[in-house]
Amino acid sequence: MANPTTNYGFIMPTATDLVTDLPADFNVFGQAVDTQMLTNANAAIAKTIVDAKGDLIAATAADTVSRLAVGSNGQYLQADSTAATGLKWASVGGAGVGFVSTDTFSAVTTLSLNSKFTSTYENYRVYVDFTNGGGTQSLLMRMRAGGTDTTSSLYGYYSPVGTWSGSAAAEGRIGTVPPIGSTAQVVMDVSRPFDTKITKITGLYVFTSGSSIGEVSEFAMVLNNTTSYDGFTIYSGGNSFTGRVTIYGYSLS
């Protein structure tokens, strides 16, 4: 070992000192070690500063740290000069895109989803992927509010089959459920469902049968009232279908 030591420069007793000056030199060496240990301890961050999974250690001032408790699911870390640590956990809002949810379903004839649309976002993109378990019927959609399907006030258009008109229409048609075992994809934009404004829905529907495209169609729906909708129902006239629904929210301002 080098003398003085490589990292901290401690002066250790030499071979001669072991005979003549051991007590005094060892005292110098020991005091240097003690001082350095205290310096290291003061510079270290104690693990007891954090309390829960996801807690962060953040600076509150020069050479000063503090615990920033973990945020809630779905929140992101945001700079904030008014916060003690200069950071805070915040919910997604305003302009931008955020993940809302993914729901899987198996062998159902009716799929109802609640509490998906909120004031967090103005608009939503909905993806539905499913496999048909039996029969060939129309794939239909209704909007929901407070856990109840709307049964009126919907105008819908499905290309190229036909139209719905009048405020008594209960649902809009997305497309024709594919043959048994075939897969289908629905992509739709839902405009301002939670606001008390007219809700518009536009989308594209594609189903495949084996390696072939079975049907590609566009659809559109308009709710001619000012209900605040928080969910929707998709159903297929008695067919069972299995798949997944993924929803994203986005705002324009």
Image (cartoon, grey):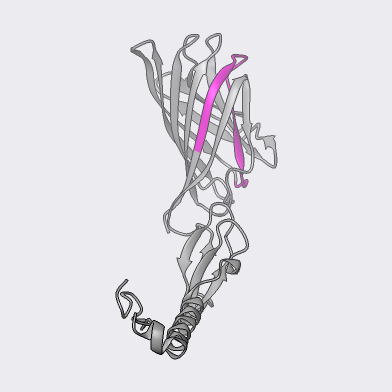
Residue 210 among magenta residues? no
Residue 205 at what x, y percent from top left? 42, 25
User: Which residue sits at x=50%, y=36%?
Assistant: 246
Of 153 and 227, which appears nearest the observer?
A: 227
Judge from the rendering whether residue 239 lies leftward or rightward of residue 64; answer left or right.
Answer: right
Residue 237 at what x, y percent from top left? 60, 16
Image vertical order of residue 127 relative to residue 239, above or below: below
The quadrant of the picture occupied by the C terminus is bottom left
Image vertical order of residue 120 relative to residue 237, above or below: below
Judge from the rendering whether residue 203 lies leftward or rightward of residue 234; answer left or right.
Answer: left
Image vertical order of residue 36 relative to residue 241, above or below: below
User: Which residue sits at x=51%, y=48%?
Assistant: 192
Residue 130 at what x, y percent from top left? 50, 22
User: Which residue sits at x=31%, y=80%?
Assistant: 4
Report if residue 121 is visible in the image: yes
Residue 242 among magenta residues? yes
Q: In which quarter of the image is residue 115?
A: top right
**Residue span colored magenta:** 226-246
User: Which residue sits at x=40%, y=82%?
Assistant: 18
Of 14 and 212, which appears nearest the observer?
A: 14
Judge from the rendering whether residue 164 lies leftward or rightward of residue 206; answer left or right.
Answer: right
Q: Which residue lies furthest to the front in this view?
A: 19
Image vertical order of residue 182 relative to residue 140, above or below: above
Report if residue 87 is visible in the image: no
